Image (tube, coloured by chain):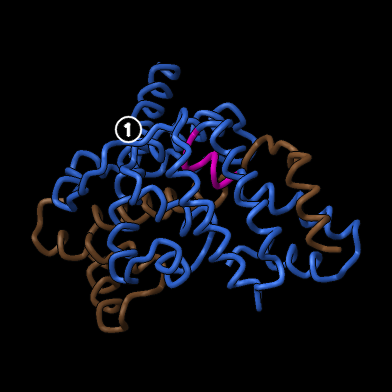
Chain colours: A blue, B brown
C-alpha cells in the first residue's frame, strides 16, 4: 500500500484543520501523480485529481482503514483517467504476446543490460532515462500501463492492484510481466544507444 | 534467448522478482540462473527496469484547487 495514503488518512481523522490541509496536499500529489503517469497530460491529471478528491470529500467517513481508502482512491482515479482523455495518449487496446516480447540473444550483452543503472550524480543521464521511461509507459496499451503504474510506481501489492483493476491476481501478474518486459525492451534500446555514444566519445 | 529452457524461465522472472513464485519454481529459476549468462543478464536488466519505475518521482505537483479544498473542509466540519 502507498504509505502516504496511510499518513493522510490519520491526518484527516485527527480533526485538526492544519493536518487536514496537509493531508489534502499529500492526496493531491498521489492522485495528480497517478493521473500524469497514466494520461501523460497535465490537464487530464488535474481533472482527475479534482474529481477524485471532491468525491473523496463526500465519502470521507466511509473508509475503515487506509487500505480501503487506497483501493477506492485508485479505482476512482483510474475511471476518471479513462474518461478524461482530452490530451491523453492511449495506445490502442491490444494484447502483448510474451513470444513477441522475448529478447534476442544480441539484446543480452552485459553492456546492453546494465547501462541504465545511473548513479545520482549523472544528472543528464537521469533526465534522459526519465524521459525514455515516460515514453515507454505511455506507449503501453492502457490495461498493461495501469497495472505497471499501480504495482511498480504506486507500489500497491498484487492483490490491491487486482482489486483496483477488477481482475484476478493471476491476470494482474501476467499483465505486469508483459508490461515490465515491454518497458525493459524500450530501455534496452536506450542503453544500447548510450553504450554506442560512450564508445564514440572514447574513440 | 534461443533455448527452450530459457523461454520457460523467462516467463517466471517477473514473479520471481516480486517473490511471488511458488518455492518449487523459485528453486528451478535459481538453479537455471547458476549456469545461464543470458538469463542472468536479462534478469539484471528487468530488475533495473523495476527499480527505475520505483524511483520515478513527479517533478511538479500543482496545489489542490479551491473547489477541492472547500469540499474537503466542509466534509470535515
Residue A58's spot in the image, x, y percent? Answer: 68, 60
Q: Is residue A101 left or right of residue A156?
A: left
Give the residue at x 52% y 52%. A153
Q: Which residues are magenta?
A: A33-40
Which chain does the residue under circle 1 lie in?
A
Q: Quadrant of residue A14?
A: bottom right
Disc tally is 1
Q: Nearer the viewer, residue A15 or A148?
A: A15
Let me know if residue A36 is in the magenta part: yes
Q: Is residue B6 left or right of residue B70?
A: left
The residue sitting at 91% across, 56% down in the picture is A18
Picture residue at 52% right of the left edge, 56% below the top:
A76
Q: Residue furthest bottom?
A: B23
Who's the residue at 49% across and 34% down the image?
Answer: A40
Disc 1 crowd, CA 10 A, few/some/many (<14, 14-19, 20+): some
User: Which residue in the protein does label 1 denote?
Assistant: A189
Task: Name the foreground residue: A45 vs A200.
Answer: A45
**Viewer-proximal residue among A122 and B72:** B72
Amino acid at each position: 500500500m502507498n504509505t502516504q495514503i496511510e499518513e493522510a488518512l490519520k491526518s484527516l481523522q485527527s480533526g485538526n484543520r492544519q493536518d487536514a490541509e496537509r493531508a489534502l496536499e499529500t492526496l493531491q500529489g498521489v492522485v495528480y501523480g497517478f493521473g500524469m503517469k497514466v494520461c501523460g497530460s497535465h490537464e487530464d491529471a488535474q481533472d482527475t485529481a479534482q474529481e477524485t478528491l471532491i468525491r473523496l470529500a463526500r465519502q470521507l467517513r466511509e473508509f475503515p482503514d487506509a487500505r480501503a481508502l487506497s483501493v477506492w482512491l485508485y479505482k476512482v482515479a483510474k475511471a476518471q483517467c479513462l474518461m478524461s482523455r482530452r490530451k491523453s495518449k492511449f495506445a490502442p487496446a491490444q494484447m502483448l504476446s510474451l513470444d513477441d516480447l522475448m529478447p534476442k540473444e544480441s539484446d543480452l550483452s552485459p553492456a546492453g543490460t546494465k547501462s541504465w543503472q545511473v548513479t545520482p550524480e549523472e544528472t543528464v543521464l537521469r533526465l534522459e532515462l526519465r524521459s525514455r521511461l515516460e515514453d515507454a509507459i505511455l506507449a503501453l496499451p492502457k490495461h498493461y500501463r495501469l497495472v505497471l503504474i499501480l504495482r511498480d510506481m504506486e507500489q500497491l501489492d498484487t492483490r490491491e492492484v487486482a482489486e483496483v483493476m477488477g481482475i484476478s491476481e493471476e491476470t494482474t501478474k501476467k499483465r505486469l510481466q508483459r508490461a515490465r518486459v515491454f518497458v525493459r525492451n524500450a530501455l534496452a534500446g536506450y542503453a544500447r544507444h548510450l553504450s554506442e555514444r560512450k564508445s564514440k566519445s572514447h574513440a | 534467448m534461443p533455448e527452450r529452457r530459457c523461454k520457460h524461465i523467462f516467463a517466471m522472472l517477473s514473479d520471481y522478482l516480486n517473490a511471488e513464485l511458488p518455492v518449487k519454481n523459485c528453486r528451478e529459476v535459481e538453479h537455471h540462473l547458476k549456469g545461464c549468462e543470458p538469463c542472468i543478464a536479462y534478469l539484471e536488466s528487468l530488475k533495473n527496469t523495476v527499480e527505475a519505475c520505483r524511483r520515478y518521482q513527479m517533478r511538479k505537483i500543482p496545489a489542490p484547487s479551491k473547489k477541492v479544498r472547500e469540499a474537503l473542509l466542509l466534509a470535515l466540519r
